[in-house]
Image (cartoon, rainbow, N blue to C red):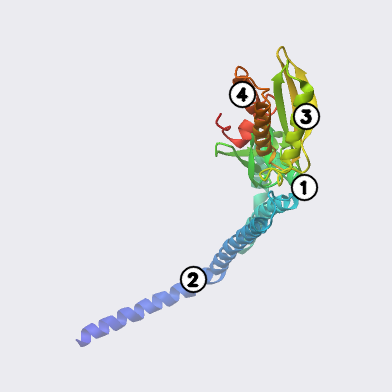
């Protein structure tokens, strides 16, 4: 019994000596000094990045909450820009944190900076050729944000280099490098900012609904104009349209003449992004007014309805940005 106790005591003493020697040696000293600083630095960097993300999300939620609590039907241009700026600032801040952490790590680990000059020169030359597009994207994103070309929630059509059809959708995210759009089919399109050649903002400040109205060439145009003017007046009293219209719709007049039809055009200024909804409602009102007046005959009903629901001038943009058309 005594022998076992002495053996256990000896092993415990020996282990404590080795453990003390380990922490008192070079490795233990490095862990307690530089190693601890490295761990604390990495933890601080992670916490800083998480705080930046939390702050950006809080700002975004605050902007969304203010919009939902207000009576506005669309976001203001200031709110769109603030949300885009918050996203960019968070992205840039996290990038700066990473750079600072790297610099501090080289200092803590006593890595000689002079020995990195040659590899850095080679790496810089390689990145100079390989990262040209990234630099181009960053510069383009900077000007997109500062010039307020578009912001979160805007309805845009972007012409991308090398792609014939423009990318259309609602802006869901803007950073210095990429712009993300959600199409009418629900797809998320990620577009490098440097590849954007032309920007068409369909919801900047205000929008315009364009309605082309084909009527038979034999119809009395004066009577048709009276009916359409009545439609314009009723539109401002319509409960579904009065909050979307900025002023009373205007009848421009004859837009074109074909063999058996005369095309009239009606335009209306609307809230940003609401031009398609207003256009659909106006077409319904126009069809109802013409039908009640007996201008649309049974033989002409189908082609006239198709022409009204699929106007040549604005159907392309509406189809791509607003999803499926209404059922006939």
For residue 226, the mark is 3
Question: Which of the two marks, 1 or 2, is nearer to us in this view?
Answer: 1
Left or right of 13, for residue 174:
right
- Residue at the image point whose x is 35% and y is 81% from the top: 13
Residue 135: % across, % down = 70, 41
Mark 4 or mark 2, earlier in chain: 2
Q: Residue at x 72, y 39 (%)?
A: 235
- Which mark lies nearer to you, 1 or 3? 3
Q: Nearer the viewer, mark 3 or mark 2?
A: 3
Q: Residues within 10 Å of mark 4 (few under 14, many from 20)?
A: few
Task: Give the residue number, with chain letter if any, for mark 4.
Answer: 306
* Residue topped by disc 2: 28
Query: How many neighbours does mark 3 have within 10 angstroms: few (below 14), some (14-19), or many (20 or more)?
Result: few
Q: Residue at x 31, y 81 (%)?
A: 10
Q: Position of residue 5 (x, y in %)?
A: 25, 85
Q: Which corner quadrant of the image does residue 69 belong to? A: bottom right
- The residues tagged by marks 3 and 2 sit, at their Cα atoms, a distance apart of 94 Å
Looking at the rendered image, the quarter that the C terminus falls into is: top right
Mark 1 = which residue?
Answer: 146
Q: Do tag 1 and tag 2 residues touch (Cβ < 8 Å)? A: no
């Amino acid at each position: 019994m005594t022998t076992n106790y002495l053996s256990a005591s000896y092993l415990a003493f020996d282990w404590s000596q080795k453990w003390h020697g380990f922490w008192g040696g070079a490795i233990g000293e490095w862990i307690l000094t530089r190693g601890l600083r490295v761990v604390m630095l990495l933890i601080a960097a992670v916490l800083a990045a998480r705080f930046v993300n939390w702050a950006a999300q809080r700002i975004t939620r605050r902007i969304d909450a203010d919009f939902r609590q207000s009576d506005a039907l669309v976001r203001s241009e200031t709110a769109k820009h603030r949300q885009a700026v918050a996203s960019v600032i968070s992205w840039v801040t996290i990038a700066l944190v990473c750079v600072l952490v790297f610099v501090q790590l080289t200092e803590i680990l006593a890595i000689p900076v002079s020995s990195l000059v040659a590899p850095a020169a080679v790496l810089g030359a390689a990145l100079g050729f390989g990262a040209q597009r990234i630099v181009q994207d960053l510069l383009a994103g900077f000007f997109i944000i500062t010039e307020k070309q578009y912001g979160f929630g805007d309805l845009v059509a972007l012409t991308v280099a090398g792609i014939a059809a423009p990318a259309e959708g609602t802006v869901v995210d803007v950073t210095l490098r990429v712009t993300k759009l959600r199409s009418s089919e629900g797809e998320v399109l990620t577009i490098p900012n440097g590849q954007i050649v032309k920007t068409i903002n369909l919801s900047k400040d205000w929008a315009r609904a364009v309605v082309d109205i084909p009527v038979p060439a034999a119809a009395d145009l004066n009577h048709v104009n009276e009916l359409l003017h009545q439609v314009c007046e009723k539109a401002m009293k319509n409960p579904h349209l009065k909050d979307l219209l900025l002023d009373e719709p205007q009848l421009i007049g004859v837009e074109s003449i074909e063999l058996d039809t005369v095309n009239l055009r009606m335009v209306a200024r609307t809230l940003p992004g609401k031009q398609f909804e207003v256009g659909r409602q106006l077409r319904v009102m126009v069809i109802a007014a013409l039908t009640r007046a007996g201008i649309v005959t049974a033989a002409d009903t189908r082609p006239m309805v198709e022409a009204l629901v699929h106007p040549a001038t604005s159907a392309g943009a509406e189809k791509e940005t607003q999803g499926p058309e209404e059922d006939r």
